[in-house]
Amino acid sequence: MSERVYYNRLMPLAIYRELAAHLQLLDGVSVRLLPQTSSHFDYELSQIEGIAVAVPPTLDRDAQARCEEILQHYGLQQGDRPC
């Protein structure tokens, strides 16, 4: 199962949770919210470090496309960084 980490420094925790809920509707996709590791608190930054999305290699093309659509909707497609 491949896992990728996505991060948007301005996205609030509530939106990350909403994103996780949408992705977990896809069969076999698992999501972890990554805790913030910075020791410096900044009100302008997200409360978490990012979201780790694990997609099984057996996920069908329609579900893979849906996963990409969801990530694009939340604006994370360009800002991803591989795990």
Image (spheres, rainbow, N blue to C red):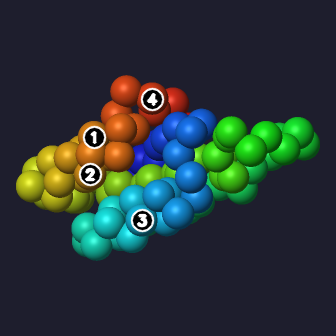
Q: Residue at x 40, y 59 (%)?
A: 19
Name the one closer to the observer, 71 or 11. 11
| Callout 1 secondary element | helix
| Callout 3 secondary element | helix
The dot on residue 30 is: none
The dot on residue 79 is: 4
> Counting residues from the N terminus, which is met first, the one under dot 2 or under dot 4?
2
Q: Are marks 4 and 1 in contact (CB under 8 Å)?
A: no
Q: Residue at x 45, y 53 (%)?
A: 53
Amino acid on which the number 4 mark rests in the picture: Gly
The dot on residue 72 is: 1
> Counting residues from the N terminus, which is met first, the one under dot 4 or under dot 3?
3
Separation of disc 3 and disc 2 at Cα? 11 Å
Separation of disc 1 and disc 2 at Cα? 5 Å
- Pointer 3 local density, CA inside 10 Å: few below 14, some 14–19, many at least 20: few
Quadrant of the drawing holding the N terminus? bottom left
